[in-house]
Image (tube, rainbow, N blue to C red):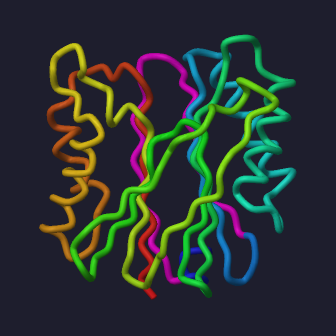
Amino acid sequence: MLERAFQIRLTSHYEPSTELGGDIWGVHLISHSKVMFYLVDFSGHGIAAAMNTFRLHSKIDSEPIGEATPREYLEHLNQWLCTQLQTGQYATVALGVMDFEKSRFDYSAAGSTAPIRIDHKHKKIEVGSGKGIPLGMSPKAKYEDRSMEFNVGDGLFMYSDALIEHGRKEGLALGRDGVENLVLKALSEQDEIEMGELMEPFISKAPRPLSDDLTAFCCVWQG
């Protein structure tokens, strides 16, 4: 429904590790011209991480962003998580609002991977920032509002840190530069970004089982 209303195409990839994990991503309608995207990665594995994921998902569903900025919303979620999580638990988050009238993606981050804007027209990428204190670590944490342009034909790629870190012991980890090169390679070879083809170089070489959940999604504004 959202895809048809906003003329976007959403594709995703998820591969679990050997344990229950704490990854979650989502998209929420805000208004006739705005949609919110988020990607969350809770620390740890097992039932605790999975339960934390469920609780945050329920919180976002019951208290949507509304007119708040991404920074304000992250600070709100952080205050709540600081009362919910046990010591040592936290969540890295990238959360942003796509404004289709203003051709802009406004976002904020809490120790997450950096969102990547895929510029199809000019065959280049713009890498945002994931800097920020993970949610649940300090009730005094403050966050920043950041922005990047987002035009018809562009894509937004967001992913969990398993894409960066998995395979480190074997010397096969992509690192941040490797992820960016993965996207650039797909951009040079595809008319439209296809998640399967974008992820294939990683999926085909990554040692199994995965040490952490892998979550990634891409939103392309087809216009």
Magenta residues, as a range?
7-29
Is 201 included in the stretch rendered in magenta?
Answer: no
Dominant secondary structure, magenta: strand
The residue at the point 69 percent across, 62 percent down is 28
Classify 173 as above or below 147.
above
Res 52 → quadrant = top right
Count of marks overlaid on the render: 0
Q: Position of residue 202 (x, y in %)?
A: 21, 39
The structure residue drawn at horizontal position 63% and vertical position 33%, both measured from the top left corner, is 133
User: Vertically, is 192 above or below 217?
Assistant: below
Q: Give the left or right position of residue 140, taking residue 104 as reference.
A: right
Front residue of 129/205: it is: 129
Q: Is residue 121 left or right of residue 47?
A: left
87 vs 129: above or below: above
**Quadrant housing the C terminus:** bottom left
Residue 145's quadrant in the figure? bottom right
Q: Position of residue 150 (x, y in %)?
A: 47, 76
> Whole-percent x and y of residue 222?
42, 83
User: Residue 27 at what x, y percent from top left?
Assistant: 62, 60
Q: Residue at x 57, y 82 (%)?
A: 6
The residue sitting at 75% across, 62% down in the picture is: 69
- Going by the image, does 173 lie left or right of 80? left
